[in-house]
Amino acid sequence: MSTPPYLTAAFYLFVDLPDYTARRQPLLDFCEQHHVKGMILLAREGINSTIAGAPEDVRAVLAYLRSDPKFAALQHKESWSDLPPFHRMKVRLKKEIVTMGVPGISPTIMAGTYVKPKDWNALISDPSVVLIDTRNDYEVELGTFEGAIDPKIKTFSELVQWVDQAKVLEEKTGKKPKVAMFCTGGIRCEKSTALMRTKGFDEVYHLEGGILKYLEEIPPEQSQWNGECFVFDDRVSVDHHLQRSGRQLCHNCRDPLPDGAMQSPEFEKGVSCPRCFSKCDEDHKRRARERQKQYELAKARRQLHIGAKIAPHK
């Protein structure tokens, strides 16, 4: 079987970038010169990205980044696709490369203890460990680790309030529990474990490389993962072999369609799904129908519709 033509590279690095605004244009220019598509976020605290293209072009971008001493330690994860996962290249400037909204959280000096995928099963099998899925509710719905707690958050920043209120994290016999946290690619756990340490949790662990690294390294027969893993590109979600699962997004709310959604009277392609139907007024739906119409026309002409969206690494 031949290798699919499109290489996707996901990467992030927490590193102090006082000149991050000046880095935007040269990085965008280099990516465009190599026909690489995707999203790169730059902030004072570092870089966060998922990009895709021909293998030699993606690796040229990675080499370009690592030639800078600031990014010499950059690591990435790879996956392959028969279709281009992204259609445009963007480099955006942000306050945070993953938004938590808590000043003073520094993963470079405060993050929890990394646990490699090969050691993760043993850790989460310990009954004294509180296992927390730090992802959004629609991600958890598709799949999670056995025994994991779902905080039922809509956005990552909501995790802060959940941590303060969660009874499962309360002290017992005068000691805070041992905590293990995980997310898609590892970046959210860098911040969430740093948050836990600021709140007095001494034993805090997170899955190095995230769910995607675990699925890459751990055979299905040894796995404690159940279901699919949501990914932030056109694949939507992947199975344990990191292959596209066939799930689709609602092009209105950008959440994955729940099982049976397309048979619901609340589903209209590009306009609404059962998750967002009640949140959309008629004016919104009218504009969404027009957008979908333009998208279909552009697709028929094999052109990129201006409304196409992409997202960074999580």
Image (cartoon, grey):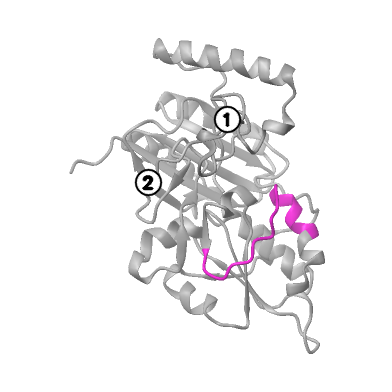
Q: Which residues are magenta?
A: 145-161
Tell me where residue 5 appears, x and y as whole percent: 29, 35
Looking at the image, is 24 positioned above or below residue 222? above
Q: Quadrant of the N terminus?
A: top left
Q: Is residue 281 visible?
A: yes
Tell me the kind of residue under disc 2.
Ser
Q: Which residue is mark 2?
A: 79
- Name which quarter of the figure residue 167 lies in: bottom right
Task: State which quadrant residue 283 falls in.
Answer: top right
Q: Amino acid at mark 1?
A: Phe
Magenta residue check for 157? yes
**Side of 280 relative to 8 (left or right):** right
Q: Few, some or many C-alpha atoms within 10 Å of disc 1 (few <14, some 14-19, many ≥20)? A: some
Eyeballing the image, is 263 above or below 18? above
Picture disc at residue 10: none
Reading the image, the residue beneath label 1 is 267
Q: Secondary structure at mark 2?
A: strand
